Every structure is written in structure tokens, then in C-alpha cells.
Amino acid sequence: MRALVQRVSEARVTVDEVVTGEIGTGLLVLVCAMRDDAEAQSEWLARKVVNLRIFRGEQDRMNRSLLDIGGKALIVSQFTLAAETKGNRPGFSAAAAPDEGRRLYGHFSEQVASHGVSVANGIFGADMKVALVNDGPVTIWLDTDSK
């Protein structure tokens, strides 16, 4: 699985002008299930996200995690993280099939919540508008193939 994690002071996702998920301080996690991913990748990624020490702590250093600060997570499915860009038009054959992507997206959200993190979500497959204030800015790329 792949994720683009952004430390935010606020973030929200809107579908058809209705807010479907909104958080204050925490992480916006754009996530994509890749072909051949399974629960093991989802669980590893969830543990990594909630324990990633990218929040300010002592001496203004990044040494606190989402769990440490009691922050929230806004999790948004984004299959375009699987883009293959050899040419000018991206291909997405590396992404999981839609049904499997939906299942693993749900599993990932459940796994993040199982760590005690309050989770808000977008809607899988919907045309979403995401608004955020990136704090720092801090943006981290995670890929279970790179563990």
C-alpha cells in the first residue's frame, strides 16, 4: 500500500458540497491499495502512520506521534498514488482492483482506529474535494514495498 501523509492543523473532504470528513490537528492520509496487497500491508501501514514521529515536541523537534498528541486522522482513498508515469498519460494498472481497493481502504481505516485514533473518511471512488492546511509543511511518502 502507498500513502502520502501530511501533518495538518485542519483538513476536510467534501463530496457534492457535503462535508464527509473533517479534522483539526492530525494527519491527512491519502492512501492507495496496490495490486497484490493484503491485510498485512494495511496493518503495517496503519502502525507506521499512527507511530510516525512528525509532530513537534521538546525543543521544537519532530519527535511526537499522532498517538502522543491525541491527534485525528482524515483518511482519503486516492488510487492515483499508483500512477505509472513513463509516458505523458499516467497508467494505473499497479493499483488494486476497485473492490479489493475498497476493502483494503476500509481495513486500513479500521486499523488506524484500532490504535485509538479518531478517524474521519472520504468516500471511496467519489469525486472528492480535499482542503487542508499543511502544518510545517510536513509531507511524508510511505510505501509498504519500501519497508
Image: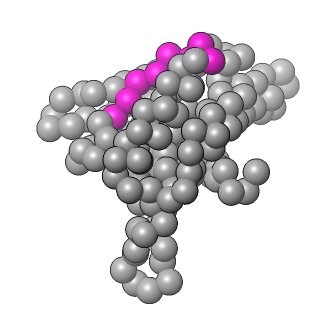
In the rendering, at what x and y percent does residue 56 appear? 73, 27
**Residue in the image at 43% along x and 69% along y:** 93
In the rendering, at what x and y percent does residue 134 appear? 52, 39
**Residue in the image at 75% along x and 32% along y:** 53
**Residue in the image at 85% along x and 25% along y:** 59
In the rendering, at what x and y percent does residue 142 appear? 64, 49
Residue farthest along the right direction in this orientation? 59
- Number of dots carrying numbers: 0
> Which quarter of the picture shows residue 11?
top left
Magenta span of residues: 115-122
Residue farthest along the bottom direction in this orientation? 87
Residue farthest along the left direction in this orientation? 16
> Which quarter of the picture shows residue 51?
top right
Left or right of 24 on screen, residue 71: right
Q: Which of 32 and 68 is in front in this view?
A: 32
In the rendering, at what x and y percent does residue 90 appear? 40, 75
Residue 76 colored magenta? no
In the rendered image, the vertical position of residue 38 relative to residue 87, given as above or below:
above
**Residue in the image at 56% along x and 26% along y:** 111
Q: Nearer the viewer, residue 133 or 96?
A: 96
Residue 146 visible within the image? yes
Q: State the scheme by which the image is colored.
A: one colour
Residue 81 visible within the image? no
In the rendered image, the vertical position of residue 120 relative to residue 33, given as above or below:
above
Left or right of 3 on screen, residue 59: right
Q: Nearer the viewer, residue 97 or 129?
A: 97
